[in-house]
Image (cartoon, rainbow, N blue to C red):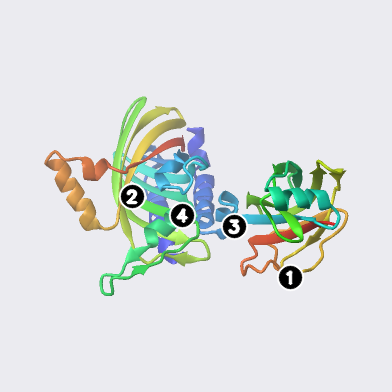
Amino acid sequence: MKKLLLPLAAILLLALAVPAAFSEAELGIGLSPGTVANPPDPNNVDPILNFHVGWSYSILYLSWDAYAMPDYWVYNNTTYVDPSSGYTVQGYLVPGFLNMFDIGVKILLKPFLLYAEAGPNMLYLRGGTDYGRVGVNARFGAGLKFGFWGINLSGTQIFASTDDLNAAIHQAIHGNWSDLTQGMVPTLNFVIYF
Amino acid sequence: MKMRKLLPLVLLAVGALFLLSGCDAMLDAIFPTNQIYVDVAINKASYPNDWFNTWHFGSYPGTVTLQLYDVKSGSFTTATGSWMSVDYNYIHFAFVFTKLNDDTFELTANYLSVNYGPSGPNPIFYDPSGIRMGFPVSSVSMPYKNSGDSTGHSVNLYMYFY
């Protein structure tokens, strides 16, 4: 939990430190199709729920998103082949929160909204365990803002490491967007602005 | 601008939300993991014609209806099943209820025999350790600590129509 509290504390301090007129906080909730988590029974799956907290200053955008991931997703993403032994190390079959801490830009051309951000993510497992490995994610979003509320659609790509993210961006610069967009998790977000 | 006056409240909410994200109770609420398996067994001695047809001909049109009542929410889940297997003493009907919250559930069973008409409700219930459950209404609180499963989130119940 301490690892998770530090980024939040930084966001909160920044929010308090700058004049309110130049900053904007936001709270939201989002839904993603459950099929993106590769469920064992695609015909019987619930959507993935996520909680969103964000703060922006001019075009600077900081956010934290916690995706409630089902046990089979956690299992698939924590199972790996040990390179030294060649054996498969079984993952955790428990649900968890995939916490994403991102920094990027948000551009508001009322009522249209565009944003792009990237940052690390950490997996919290039910039972009080923080999965040791830190991943990276990139997110693009677009939507509409009406006064104090808004709706937007985002796509989040999750990478195992910063090297994977850099490689995907490098490929995209050279015209191959597949690494950056393939397997992207779409999310419909409802946001309240303060 | 009025919304900005709510900023301290928002920050508090953010903090609470953040703490909750690490809270197992929240994950349990989003992903209810309890499941109840029920093996309903029809006794050969009491229903000999039913057992005979099933054992010798492999077909039997009788059904068991099992009702699960969630005491907390007041909701009912009803399942009707056909026979699953037969052994030398019983015809078995298998049921499974998944994605259940931490709550108390009452089970009521009815057996409809083509040869003998409706029976029940309420056969005799046993938990995995052989403890007889309540009568006439059998209730089980999840997680059930005497389930044989270390987490208590999965319980196998046995019901007998004698």
Of badges 1 and 4, nearer the viewer stands 1
Q: Position of residue B35 (x, y in %)?
A: 64, 55
Pick the front one: A15 or A180: A180
**Which residue type carries mark 1?**
Ser
Pick the front one: B26 or B126: B126
**Which residue type carries mark 2?**
Asp
Circle 4 residue: A72
Residue B64 vs A86, above or below: the answer is above
Circle 3 residue: B25
Q: Position of residue A40 (x, y in %)?
A: 46, 49
Of badges 1 and 2, nearer the viewer stands 1
**Which residue type carries mark 4?**
Tyr
Do the residues under discs 1 and 2 have CB atoms within 8 angstroms? no
Position of the C terminus of chain B by quadrant: bottom right
Q: How far apart are marks 4 and 3 (CA)?
A: 19 Å
In screen coordinates, is B29 left or right of B54? left
At 50% from the left edge and 40% from the top edge, which residue is drawn? A43
Residue A106 vs A129, above or below: the answer is above
- Disc on the earlier residue, 3 or 1: 3
Circle 2 residue: A102
Q: Position of residue B75 (x, y in %)?
A: 74, 42
Q: Position of residue B85 (x, y in %)?
A: 67, 54
At 40% from the left edge and 49% from the top edge, which residue is drawn? A64
Q: How many neighbours does mark 4 have within 10 angstroms: few (below 14), some (14-19), or many (20 or more)?
A: some
Q: Give the structural element (helix, strand or loop) at label 4.
A: helix
Of badges 4 and 3, nearer the viewer stands 4
